[in-house]
Image (cartoon, grey):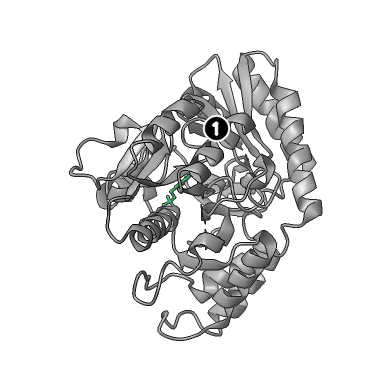
Amino acid sequence: MDIKGLDREYIANTYGRADVVFVEGHGAEIVDDRGKKYIDLGAGIAVNAFGVADPVWTMAVMAQVSKLQHMSNLYYTEPCVKLAKLLCERTGFKKVFFGNSGAEANECAIKTARKWAFDRYGDESHSTIITLKNSFHGRTITTLAATGQDAFHTKFGPFTPGFVHASAQDAEEVRALADRGDCCAVMLELIQGEGGVVPLTREYVDEVVKIARERDMLVIVDEVQTGNGRTGTMYAYEQFGFMPDIVSTAKGLGGGLPLGACLMGERVEHTLGRGDHGSTFGGNPIACAGAISIVERIDDELLGSVRRKGEYIKKALTGAKGVRSVTGLGLMVGILTDKPAGEVARAALARGVIVLTAHEKVRLVPPLTITDEQLEKAVEILKEVTGE
Ligand SMILES: *Cc1c(COP(=O)(O)O)cnc(C)c1O
């Protein structure tokens, strides 16, 4: 079958795909349709947290598939309840709303913040949300509006009003926007992922949280990419020493199945009431059964290995030929190279290593369970590619 030709003919032309058809894999090793093997430093896009066909995840998913695949949110089912309890006990959040993607998790976060302000002020006078420039929050009309990149603010207007953007790392801009008096929340990625794996500094985040607290605003952290062990803690905010009011997450949570979650803290746990929000597929039993098997295994040992492997990548690539800088936390790494990132990704792929790009950077977000041998081999190949 001419998969590439059929894709061009029948799939909406929104993706620039790499020239490869993947068919199967095991952990961080993926095989294409010609039998060539690759080491995976992308995990989809930070999605396959435990790699491909992880046996524990597969068993959990298969057991649920053959039992009950869906019953809608009109009835009680066990997997979503178990997962929500796990997430809350793990983090201290009080309530969880499940959707199917990062954008949906952010939609829920945005609705929760606006409803919270509506309840507080009795009108929509405090509906504005501050987000950061160079952020990425999703592809729906509202999450595009939240995304602080002008490139996303054309062609599809009118966009949802009520978002203002502040330069990352300049707390005075956040303060000035907060002083307008119409804001209910500030929403940020602690490491801007799609924006090029750019971490915010602890000092900046401290200041933003302080401003939010002083101005009676909520702090929403978009952990769609940074969450679920990716940065070496269950959620990245733990490394920034504060507790957000709302956290959105998705990508790695489902281990490869579509699942998003909006975690709600004390201040907003009762904000959404019956009928305020919903999702037909949200909290799907199969996705949640898989997610339980992922979250249960993101323990101290795994998180320690994520930090160690992240340090290894940083050390191996910092100062390497053709590498200008290495940023990130845990197994979320951005590399600025002399060569254009796309060229590095193509050359690495040709040599059997899958890497992603993010803006001008090469981005590495491998399965959390990648072995040391696989990582060493992949990093060596990457060094060859960047250095020549
Ligand atoms: C990927 C991503 C999203 C969007 O997630 P989808 O599942 O594609 O809707 C939102 N925020 C961040 C930080 C992301 O990395």
Q: Identify the residue at image location x=41%, y=45%.
A: 137
State whether label 1 is within 8 Å of ligand 1. no
Look at the picture and state if 59 lies above or below 135: below
Q: What's under tag 1, amino acid-wise?
A: Val
Q: Identify the residue at image location x=55%, y=39%.
A: 210
Q: From the viewer's side, name the closer residue of 127 and 377.
A: 127
| Residue 349 location (% of width, % of height) | 55, 33
Query: Is residue 387 in sight in this rendering?
Result: yes
Look at the picture and state if 148 lies above or below 80: above
Where does the C terminus fall, quadrant-wise? top right
| Residue 352 location (% of width, % of height) | 61, 35
Q: Which residue is mark 1?
A: 197
Question: In which image quadrant can residue 272 be found?
Answer: bottom left
Query: Is residue 255 in sight in this rendering?
Result: no
Identify the element where label 1 is drawn.
loop
Residue placed farthest to the right in the image?
Answer: 301
| Residue 199 location (% of width, % of height) | 58, 32
Q: Seen in the image, is 232 located left or right of residue 5?
A: right
Look at the picture and state if 52 lies above or below 371: below
Q: Identify the residue at image location x=33%, y=50%.
A: 126
Where does the N terminus fall, quadrant-wise? bottom left
Look at the picture and state if 26 lies above or below 208: below
Q: Seen in the image, is 378 located left or right of residue 168?
A: right
Q: Seen in the image, is 298 located left or right of residue 285?
A: right
| Residue 321 location (% of width, % of height) | 66, 13
Neighbourhood count class around disc 1 (C-alpha, 10 Å): few under 14, some 14–19, many 20 upward: many
Q: Identify the residue at image location x=59%, y=75%.
A: 62
Tally of marks: 1
Question: In which image quadrant can residue 292 be found?
Answer: bottom right
